[in-house]
């Protein structure tokens, strides 16, 4: 019995099963659920503060460039000169030393510009005396045109307008003189900038590749390949755009010069040169130059010739937009017309005429760099 009781001591005392440990409820579980941030809103907030930082950096760069307008414009002009004259210097460098080829190219370009300006000056001086008589006769024709059908402007109104213009000029003569003096100061700045641009362009044409390679060696080794791809793509776009716009401007100027000569408009050569330089500002430059030519034609030849010149704005614009730009600018970066219009407008608002002329090549370079780096990552 003792053995049995030892083997079977009896039923074990009743034990409760262990309850699982329950963690105390957190604060969101006790009350209302915590608000969740929408993933799209969180992503938009991240982009927003990054865009604010980028915008602040761009604003700082614009402020700095605004204080350094003269050297910045000079370097830009030097790059334009390099893009135009570098092929000629490379071609001349095959038959003569590099230094002599650069010197011959620069001097040849300067002599060409000086000869063109001398020809324009001689044309203006030769036609100035007869131009005064033509303008006075043209003003009389405009008066008779306004007095006739369909305007029927009273002669007293026309004479009153002339007297108001003359009185305005007499009353604001001092202001006009001070403005002319201020413009003379700008002429001095322009001459200084041109000299600086010429100085920089000589070195860019002669050893621009060596200067770029030196700048690459100053960068970290991991960034050199990206900077090399971006620099080469940007320069190809800039050089292609610059050479293309020069060809388009020359074509426009030739068409305008032929048309003005056939119509017998005075100062045809100066107006042709004005058309060439105005075409360098896309969209708005050529119509402004043609409007000036229309005013000259109106005063010298009458309203019919002026209307023909105004019609040339539409014709030349169509030729430029549908023939010259697609053919000549095919090697440069193609940009949508909306982007061109917005770029020129924004550049004009930010920096006036200089900004309008510079904005489009800058945008084309940026877009070319973005495309090159995107393709490099894809490879």
Image (spheres, grey):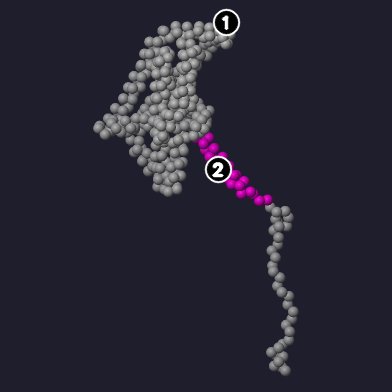
Image quarter of the N terminus? bottom right
Pointer 2 local density, CA inside 10 Å: few below 14, some 14–19, many at least 20: few
- Closer to us: 31 or 325: 325
* Rendering coords of residue 309 (x, y %): 47, 17
* Rendering coords of residue 348 (x, y %): 51, 27
Vertical relation: 299 (above or below) 72: above
**SS label for mark 2:** helix
Q: Earlier in the sequence, mark 1 or mark 2?
A: 2
* Magenta segment main secondary structure: helix
Q: Residue at the location (43% across, 46% down)?
A: 376
Residue 45 within the segment the image draws in magenta: yes
What is the CA distance from the residue labelled 1 to the residue labelled 2?
65 Å
* Residue 350 shows up from this direction: no
The extreme bottom residue here reads 1
Vertical relation: 286 (above or below) 217: above
Tell me the magenta residue range. 35-63
| Figure quadrant of residue 80 | top left
Q: Residue at the location (41% across, 7% down)?
A: 129
Q: Residue at the location (52% across, 14% down)?
A: 175
For residue 217, which numbered disc appears in the image?
A: none
* Rendering coords of residue 225 (x, y %): 40, 45
For residue 155, which numbered disc appears in the image?
A: 1
Task: Please give left or right for residue 218 compared with residue 46 in the image.
Answer: left
Dot 2 corresponds to which residue? 50
* Residue 145 shows up from this direction: yes
**SS label for mark 1:** helix
- Closer to us: 162 or 21: 162
Q: Are marks 1 and 2 in contact (CB under 8 Å)?
A: no
Task: Please give left or right for residue 34 compared with residue 378 in the image.
Answer: right
| Figure quadrant of residue 242 | top left
Residue 166 within the segment the image draws in magenta: no
């Amino acid at each position: 019995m003792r053995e049995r009781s030892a083997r079977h001591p009896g039923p074990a005392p009743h034990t409760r099963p262990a309850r699982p440990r329950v963690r105390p409820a957190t604060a969101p579980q006790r009350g209302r659920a915590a608000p969740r941030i929408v993933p799209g809103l969180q992503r938009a907030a991240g982009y927003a503060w990054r865009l604010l930082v980028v915008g602040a950096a761009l604003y700082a760069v614009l402020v700095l460039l605004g204080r350094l307008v003269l050297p910045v414009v000079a370097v830009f002009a030097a790059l334009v000169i390099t893009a135009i004259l570098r092929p000629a210097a490379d071609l001349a460098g095959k038959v003569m030393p590099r230094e002599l080829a650069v010197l011959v190219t620069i001097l040849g370009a300067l002599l060409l510009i000086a000869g063109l300006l001398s020809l324009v000056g001689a044309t203006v001086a030769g036609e100035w005396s007869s131009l005064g008589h033509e303008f006075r006769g043209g003003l009389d024709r405009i008066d008779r045109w306004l007095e006739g059908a369909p305007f029927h402007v009273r002669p007293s109104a026309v004479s009153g307008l002339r007297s108001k213009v003359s009185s305005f000029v007499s009353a604001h003569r001092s202001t006009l003189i001070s403005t002319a003096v201020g413009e003379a100061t700008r002429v001095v700045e322009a001459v200084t900038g041109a000299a600086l641009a010429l100085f920089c362009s000589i070195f860019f044409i002669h050893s621009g590749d060596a200067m770029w390679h030196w700048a690459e060696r100053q960068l970290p080794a991991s960034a050199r390949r990206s900077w090399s791809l971006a620099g080469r793509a940007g320069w190809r776009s800039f050089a292609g755009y610059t050479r293309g716009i020069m060809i388009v401007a020359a074509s426009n100027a030739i068409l305008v010069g032929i048309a003005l000569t056939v119509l017998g408009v005075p100062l045809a050569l100066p107006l042709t040169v004005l058309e060439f330089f105005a075409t360098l500002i896309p969209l708005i430059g050529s119509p402004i130059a043609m409007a000036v030519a229309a005013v000259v034609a109106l005063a010298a030849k009458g309203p019919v010739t002026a209307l023909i010149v105004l019609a040339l704005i539409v014709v030349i614009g169509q030729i430029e937009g549908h023939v010259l730009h697609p053919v000549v600018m095919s090697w440069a970066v193609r940009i949508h017309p909306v982007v061109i219009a917005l770029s020129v407008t924004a550049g004009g608002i930010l920096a006036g005429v200089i900004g309008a002329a510079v904005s489009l090549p800058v945008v084309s370079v940026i877009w070319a760099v973005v495309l090159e780096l995107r393709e490099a990552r894809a490879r």
